[in-house]
Image (spheres, helix red, strand yellow):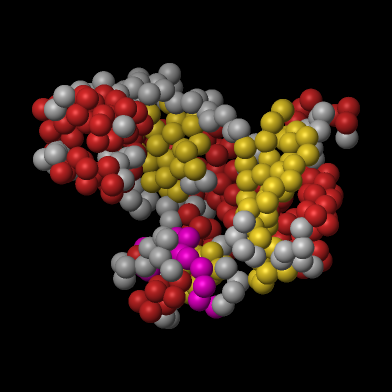
Amino acid sequence: MIILFVDFDYFYAQVEEVLNPSIKGKPVVVCVFSGRSETSGAVATANYEARKYGVKAGMPIIKAKEILPNAIYLPMRKELYQQVSNRIMNILRSYSSKIEVASIDEAYLDITDMVKDYEEAYKLGLEIKGRILKQEKITVTVGISKNKVFAKIAADMSKPNGIKVINDEEVKRLIKELDIDEYPGIGRVTAERLKALGIRKLIDILNFDFEIIKKQVGEAKATYLFSIARDEYSEPIKEKVIKSVGKMVTLKRNTRDIEEIKPFLYRTVDEAYLRLNGMMPKTLHLVAVMEDLEIITREKTFPYGVSKERAYKESLKLLEKLLEDDDRRIRRIGVRLSKFIKSATLDEFF
């Protein structure tokens, strides 16, 4: 098996640089502003010029501005980034039908049937990088290896705008050399629990009974770790089946004013529908966080798939009904879509 992993470099910030080349080379920070003040919210991503000063995803905006007050701070435009992501994913799908979209800016391709060895895989990776750069002006990093784990590690080792192959012999070497927290899916808590047992390198885990590791990190994570340590990990590429898609936003203030809430509600519908990839939901859920932080939901299920235009109308009706039944103000609003069918079957309804 040969897996090719593609990671879009500092994606949100890079899209902003493409649209406004004058900011390239300057510290750029893309933020999720809550709207309650100029500094309330969190950093979504930062380019490498900002990262070298310590600004990183998840950091409160107020702290980022303390570290880097003269950086360019931009609001996150998720709909725009999703559109660019969809186009890049379509480029990747033109190379292989065996694709697993891991996130808005990451994907795995199984290229086993397309190349005979790692040398050809490397050439294919260069071709993919060049095509994405030519069509979207976005740089990506490519990692190639025998499985998803080491393909991602290869990309992590060559960011940004790099390409790296980890062949089968190098996998055996890295299993002995890499620290436990350098593996995908091993978070801080898991790493700390393993280090408490004296496990620093992944290979160390083979000195322990499976049940001991299972007790510390759970059966699924223990199975994952042992399979990598034994060089037996071979989870196949699988297109993820979406069971539900949702989006929530915080209003500028707590309110019951439908006209004030409506643009925020419609925005959540837009962003949710961007992620459907040719599917249509039969069930529409309205989700509201009230001023006292209680979560209230309303839903409606249809005998057919619901278009985005219909979702605007139906979500507004659900909002109106919610406000009739509840006299509290709303703090956050959003939608969740579920029970999907292929949109190709909907012609008779629209």
Q: Is residue 47 magenta?
A: yes
Q: Quadrant of the N terminus?
A: top left
Foreground pick, 35 / 166: 35
Work out whether residue 33 can be spotted: yes
Residue drawn where x is 59% and y is 33% of the image: 242
Residue 22 in view here: no
Image quadrant where residue 215 sits: top left
Any magenta on residue 184? no
Work out whether residue 309 or residue 186 is closer to the camera in this orientation and state it.
186
Q: Nearer the viewer, residue 181 or 73?
A: 181
Residue 318 placement (x, y as % from top left): 80, 49
- Residue at the (50%, 30%) spot, across then down: 99
Above or below, 319 relative to 111: below
Horizontal side, residue 291 vs residue 74: left or right: right
Q: Number of callouts in the render?
A: 0
What range is drawn magenta here? 38-50
Residue at point 42% right, 52% down? 9
* Residue 275 pos. (x, y %): 63, 42
Residue 53: percent from left, percent from top: 31, 71
Which residue is nearer to you in this view: 293 or 22?
Answer: 293
Q: Residue at x 51, y 68 (%)?
A: 41
When asked about the image quadrant of residue 86, the answer is: top right
Is 172 above or below relative to 181?
above
